[in-house]
Image (tube, rainbow, N blue to C red):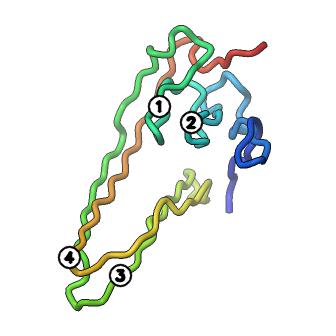
Amino acid sequence: MGREAKPEGGYHGGERLRSMSTVRSGTPGATRICPHCRTAILESASVCPGCRHHVRSGSAAQHDVVSVPALAVECSLRGPTDGNAWEYAMVLSIRDQRGEEITRQVVGVGAMQTSDERTFTLTVEVFKPAEGVGRLVTG
C-alpha cells in the first residue's frame, strides 16, 4: 500500500514514538511529533496544522517559513430526505506520481439525520522553509 511513516520517538499512551519521517532530520520533508496533539508535523512548522498550537523549533528563523495555498476544496452535504439516517466516513488518500498510495487515513466518521448538514474542507499548503529552518534543538 505504499510507504507509510512509522512512529519513531517520544511517548504517547505508554508507547514510544519517534520522529514520523524516514527522511533525515533537517532536510525537506522531515517530520516530528506535535507535543500537544501527537500528530506528525513538518520539522519546519512553527504552528501545528492539526491543533494550531505553536511548537518550538531549534531555529530562530522559524517564522520565515513561507506557505502557499496549493489546493482548497469545500463541500456541504445535507442529510437524507427519506427520514433515514446516513452514516459517513471521511477518508483522505495521498498518492504519488505513479498513482501508488503513500498513505490513507480515516479523518472522521459520523451520522446525519434529516435536518443535519456537514461541511467538509480540504486544504493543502506547500512550504518552502527559510535557510536553516527545520533543525531541531538537540543536546
Q: Is residue 40 above or below residue 13?
A: above
* Spatial CA span between label 1 and label 4: 34 Å
Amino acid, disc 4? Ser
| Label 2 residue SS | loop
Marker disc for residue 36? 2
Please give the residue where the numbered disc 3 appears in the rendered image: 86
N-term-proximal mark, 2 vs 1: 2
Please give the residue where the numbered disc 4 appears in the rendered image: 115
In the rendered structure, are the residues bearing label 2 and label 3 in contact, judged by CB atoms less than 8 Å apart? no
* Spatial CA span between label 1 and label 3: 33 Å
Marker disc for residue 53? 1
Q: Pinpoint residue 74: horizontal percent, then vertical percent.
A: 28, 55
Q: Residue at x 50, y 24 (%)?
A: 46
Single out the mark in the foreground, 2 or 3.
Answer: 2
N-term-proximal mark, 4 vs 2: 2
Q: Residue at x 46, y 63 (%)?
A: 108
